[in-house]
Image: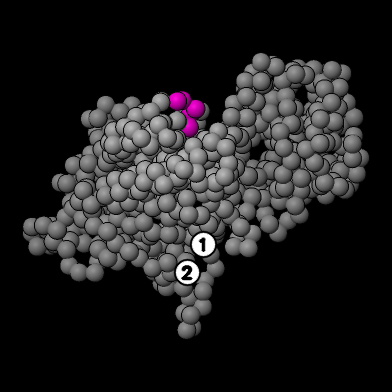
Amino acid sequence: MVPVDREDPTYGLRHSAAHVMAQAVTEMFPEAKLGWGPPHDRFENGFYYDFDLPSPLTPEDLPEIEGRMRRIVREDHPFRRRVLSADEARELFEDQPYKLQTIEDLAEGKDEYGEARPGAVISTYGQDTFEDLCLGPHLERTGQIPPDGFKLLDVSGAYWRGSGENPMLQRVHGTVWPGKEELERYLCRREEEEKRDHRRLGAELDLFSIRPEVGPGLALFHPKGALVRVLMEDYWRERHRAGGYDFVFTPHVGRSGLWETSGHLKWYAEGMYPAIGVEDERYYLKPMNCPFHMLIFNSRPRSYRDLPLRFAELGTVYRYEPSGTLRGLLRVRGFTQDDAHLFCRPDQMYQEIDRVLGFCLSFLAAYGFEEPEMELSVHDPGMPEKYAGSEADWEVAESTLAAALEARGLPYRRVEGEAVFYGPKIDIGILDTLGRRWQASTIQFDFNLPERFDLTYAGEDNKPHRPYMVHRALYGSIERFFALLIEHHAGALPVWLAPTQATVIPVSDRNLDYAREVSDELATAGLRAEVDARPERMNAKIRDAQLQKVPYMLVVGDREEEARGVSVRLRTNEDRGMTDLSSFVSHIQEIVEAKTGL
């Protein structure tokens, strides 16, 4: 679990709502075993509580729990704090095994997250007949929780303390706001988010699936989704060819020694899949592409004249993610990183950073993200032992990243102490239609891997020098960016990315041959069209195409056939009337080329 900010002004409200919910559930199930229930950020102003219950909760149970919560709120019970000895706490919670585990941790000087906390106090908070092991803080009284300001949202499974080796508990999520108006605004936005959920749209539009036969976190891209992915990859390759990158391909597995050299087995083993035994040697599925690119750099002597070198790869990697963290394509166990590694001399560094920053911004703009949010993560100079590289290296790298941002007039947030141990970085965030921030591209210095793999080039003095190296991702991962696009556009992808750009709909069977001519002419022009020849009514075909988010419906009847034209309908239900076929083809070609429109 990630500790939450107890100084957050909403913490006490959310935490108090969680305790009131726990009381309501224990009234329904007196034999309930209680886990814990802190505020959290999965839902805005969110809270939850974990229960071990004699029978499964269902969504139909939530209104009854809410009703009991409102009664407890109306009764306006004070929240009472008590400090107990370990023995007193054990006696109080003698029938609560999960609480007893937490009490033992507190008695050993650990907090509820298992982190060392010398002098930890064992305290409880109670209201009415309910008392819970808790550090607080809480409101003064249950009546301070707005009775029309909270809502229980769903029930899910969660392992006790997040470990698959522990029992599975039932987790009830809720949200609480200062009043009814704020709650309703949130619920309306959440409803819109659910409509845009890429998992639902992925099934409705037949784009991808995650099948239990394959395994959690491993996606199957269906023909339509695969086509979108190919278009994304083709655009990626086109831009990289024009940008002076060299493409590389690397294996999906590597010997254990490679991952020992890179440091992954020491620092990242828990995120890797178990070793594969081959001929008395251990191989690992790659969690990252980087070590292979180091070996390609080292495959022959490099001169200062060779630099900069830019290696790019669409490399599929595999990382073990706990099942509770998986979410559609946003968090998976197998995904394709659009990796690039830049190797340059010190005198080339600013130019390379400026170049790659511009590359990232223009690339994201092609997908409609033109107002990025920039963060610069830098080291904590007071803790030099935490970081690879020298203080001088860090100062140069951080100042170079900052200068590139400032030269382009990009506002950014400087985050002190948030750099990873091997170098500072720029994170580029993008906002979707609903104002949600998503992490997209990253530009990351690395002082660690060049040292570990002993990367050198021969300088003008004919002596070996260590190159500067930068990791760079544009999509981050194809799968995650794919999910983002679906949610941002609510499935109605831009014309250049739409799997089917136009559906040709004949008014009657006698117009079917002309409909096929129209489709063929669009295909000849490099466009993606299909003919809906089903024996359905025309309006039903139009509606079906709109539900499939097809940008254009081209209706063709006797009038259109005689004039060599098409009547154009949009997926927004706008009727643009009849136009000449050749004019329509030119129009859509321009939109696709410019990557704009619809």
The amino acid beneath tag 1 is: Met
State the residue in front, 193 or 33: 193
Q: Residue 211 placed where, x, y %?
A: 61, 57
Q: Main secondary structure of the magenta part?
A: loop
Q: Residue 134 placed where, x, y %?
A: 75, 35
Residue at numbered disc 2: 284
Q: Residue 416 placed where, x, y %?
A: 40, 35
- Tell me which residue sits at (53%, 57%) in the image: 220
- Tell me which residue sits at (48%, 28%) in the image: 572
- Tell me which residue sits at (47%, 66%) in the image: 285
* For residue 479, side relative to residue 301 (left or right): right
* For residue 533, side relative to residue 343 (left or right): right
State the residue in front, 475 or 10: 475
Going from the N terminus, do you reach mark 2 or mark 1 first? 1
Q: Residues within 10 Å of mark 2 (few under 14, many from 20)?
A: many
The numbered mark at residue 272 is 1
- Can residue 386 be seen? no
**Inter-mark Cα distance, 2 to 1:** 8 Å
- Can residue 571 be seen? yes
* For residue 74, side relative to residue 508 (left or right): right
- Cβ–Cβ below 8 Å for labels 2 and 1? yes
The amino acid beneath tag 2 is: Tyr
Q: Secondary structure at mark 1?
A: loop
Which span is picked out in magenta?
Answer: 571-575
Q: Residue 475 placed where, x, y %?
A: 39, 45
